Image (cartoon, helix red, strand yellow):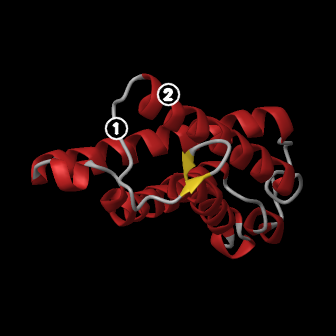
Amino acid sequence: MTVTNSASVAATPDWLGVLRRYFLFSLIGHLLWEVAHIPLYTIWTEGSAGEIVFAIVHCTGGDLMIAFSTLLLALFLFGRAEWPKQRSIPVLLAAVVMGVGYTVFSEWLNIVVREAWAYRDIMPVIPVIDAGLTPFLQWLVVPTAAYLGATSPRAWRK
């Protein structure tokens, strides 16, 4: 029989719970962001309602895959057994840098090379990298907010 201190159990984050919260916060954040910035893409004026809805759902799904991939890779590279109580900032920074890097690459690949989508003239573009400002900001804001919400000590207190 193992006896544990209930205070230490309550103060220990449940990894699965943290990942579930991160998924939920990411889903909500990326879905809202996709809905908000889709008018900056040509599909808004050229696509049907069904195509727009499909694009929002498709892009949100891709966002979730990127969010989880970057978080898991960051945890593998920088996380420790004490995470998120310790090593939280290096994991967050790594996940955000990887998410932003992938997004800049993906925007270039899909706009310039594949021509799979296009920006409208009203999309603010970051000079030099020619990436849209809103996708860039999305990968700074949403993963950071989702991570902070999921790893907050208040979120895993029982």
Residue 99 % position (x, y) = 63, 43
Residue 36 % position (x, y) = 37, 66
| Element under disc 2 | helix
Q: Is disc 2 surrounded by few (<14), some (14 to 19) or many (20+) residues within 10 Å? A: some
* In-front residue for pair 126/100: 126
* In-front residue for pair 120/18: 120
Task: Name which of mark 2 and mark 1 comes first in the sequence.
Answer: 2
Give the number of marks.
2
Circle 2 residue: 109
Is residue 8 positioned above or below 78 on the image? below
**Relative to 136, 7 lies left or right:** right
Circle 1 residue: 117
Q: Which mark is drawn over residue 53?
A: none
Rendering quarter of residue 79: top right
| Element under disc 1 | loop
Is residue 39 positioned above or below 126 on the image? below
Asked if disc 2 and disc 1 are in contact, CB closer than 8 Å, the reply is no
- Residue at horizontal 77%, vertical 60%? 12
